[in-house]
Amino acid sequence: MHDVIVVGARCAGASTAMLLARQGYKVLMIDQTEFPSDVRLSTHLLWHAGADLLHKWGLLDAVRDSNCPPLTDLSLDLGETVLHGHPPGTQVGAAFAPKRIVLDQILLNAAVAAGVEFRQKVSFEGTLKDGARVVGIRAKNADGSNWTALARVVVGADGRTSRVARAVQSPTCNETSKEQGTHNTYSYFSGVAVKGVEFFSRSERMAYAWQTNDGQVVVGILQPGREGKVSRDDVPTHFFEQLDAMAPDLAARVRAGQREEDWITGAIPSFCRKPVGPGWALVGDAGLTMDPITAAGITVALRDAESLTQALHEGLSGQRRMDEALAGFEARRDAVSLPLHQFAQQMAQLAPPTQEVMQLFGALAGNQVETDRYFGVFAQTVSPADFFDPAHLQKLLTA
Ligand SMILES: Cc1cc2nc3c(=O)[nH]c(=O)nc-3n(C[C@H](O)[C@H](O)[C@H](O)COP(=O)(O)OP(=O)(O)OC[C@H]3O[C@@H](n4cnc5c(N)ncnc54)[C@H](O)[C@@H]3O)c2cc1C
């Protein structure tokens, strides 16, 4: 009998398992993958709020030691105006972009060091139930053999196609299709000079660049999913045509460097799922899959892992009834992470800027404190609900 079984061992699952084990709970974590393992669809950006959490958990030095530099400067090039800033309310004062093969392994090692029992190359097959309550899992080893395990709570941290979410029939909400989101095209380059996190925003387009491990820079373009994807052979030409049109200076810097990996292209649907029920919880993409335009998923996963751990501790220690404690996690997630999801969905439309948006950026251009707070919405140190509150926007525009 385990206190908690966690399905999925990356940023959401390994963080949750590690934090629980550090509090003395008996945790089993499984993953169908063999580690170390990379994530193909990721641009790796971990925002300031996520870096602060890694620092608090004692894991940020391992990220720094992986030859992954701090990204302190943020810029948003809007064409006629370029905003520069540093988000407020952060202890570390920087974002980082460790490749997932690095970050996920740091979290996994920390989970195992804390006492988590980890079984890899094991797939979750279904839940065990006592009436409506989940009381364990059915799992399958790589050799096809099956086994079961019992737990007081089963956590699905198994990503956006979560089988745990399907098994518990968690309802989905706030859903948009791939076509309503962004289509991403990116690769990794060496020999490209970048300053921190660089964004370029144009009508119906965005471009971005930041440094990840070992001097490699991830450079990408985003366009509306409704435009469909370009054929594989046309990707390099298309990428540089778009980058030349949006950010000729960045395009020149990229041309001066060398591409180190294949092109990666992709789009995903975004949605939210009910994250708790009797004997189960969902964390990370399993509970909330956001459009990648704001590069928020990893930071959200870390924060929600800590919030879920708090709820599980309350329930497992008997401070509150487990169902009540898990409802507390749901309320916190909906208050903090749902507005970020809605902000990303809105940005992902890549609609031409309205008059109001132009006025907002005009007002920000002369106001460094508010520009920093705007960047704080991305860094997850300023709530989008606070920043975009109509009374606050009115004050900003009037000033
Ligand atoms: C193109 C793109 C770019 C992105 N860029 C960024 C970015 O720059 N910054 C950012 O913060 N976010 C980014 N994201 C989002 C980010 O990748 C996700 O939010 C993050 O991976 C969620 O982590 P997770 O631990 O919840 O799930 P995942 O990383 O998906 O991990 C789930 C784990 O569960 C395991 N699993 C699945 N099913 C089973 C099963 N049945 N049995 C056992 N194990 C199972 C998998 O093997 C996997 O290891 C991007 C997403 C996309 C699509």
Image (cartoon, rainbow, N blue to C red):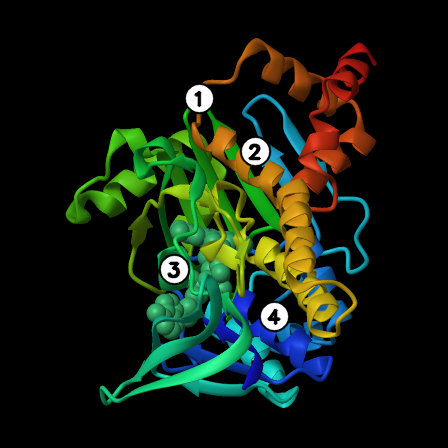
Sequence-earlier tag: 3 or 2: 3
Q: Residue at x 70, y 54 (%)?
A: 49
Q: Is residue 252 visible?
A: yes
Q: Secondary structure at mark 1?
A: loop
Q: Find disc 2 in the rendering and name its residue.
A: 343
Q: Nearer the viewer, residue 170 or 134?
A: 134
Q: Residue at x 62, y 24 (%)?
A: 81
Three-letter code, disc 4: Thr
Q: Is mark 3 within 8 Å of ligand 1?
A: yes
Q: Is mark 2 within 8 Å of ligand 1?
A: no
Sequence-earlier tag: 3 or 1: 3
Q: Nearer the viewer, residue 284 or 276?
A: 276
Task: Please give the label number shown on residue 162.
Answer: 3
Structural distance between the alpha carbons of marks 4 and 2: 25 Å
Task: Please give the label number shown on residue 351.
Answer: 1
Three-letter code, disc 2: Phe
Residue 339 picture quarter: top right
Structural distance between the alpha carbons of marks 3 and 2: 23 Å
Q: Secondary structure at mark 4?
A: helix
Say if 358 sits above or below 77 in the image: above
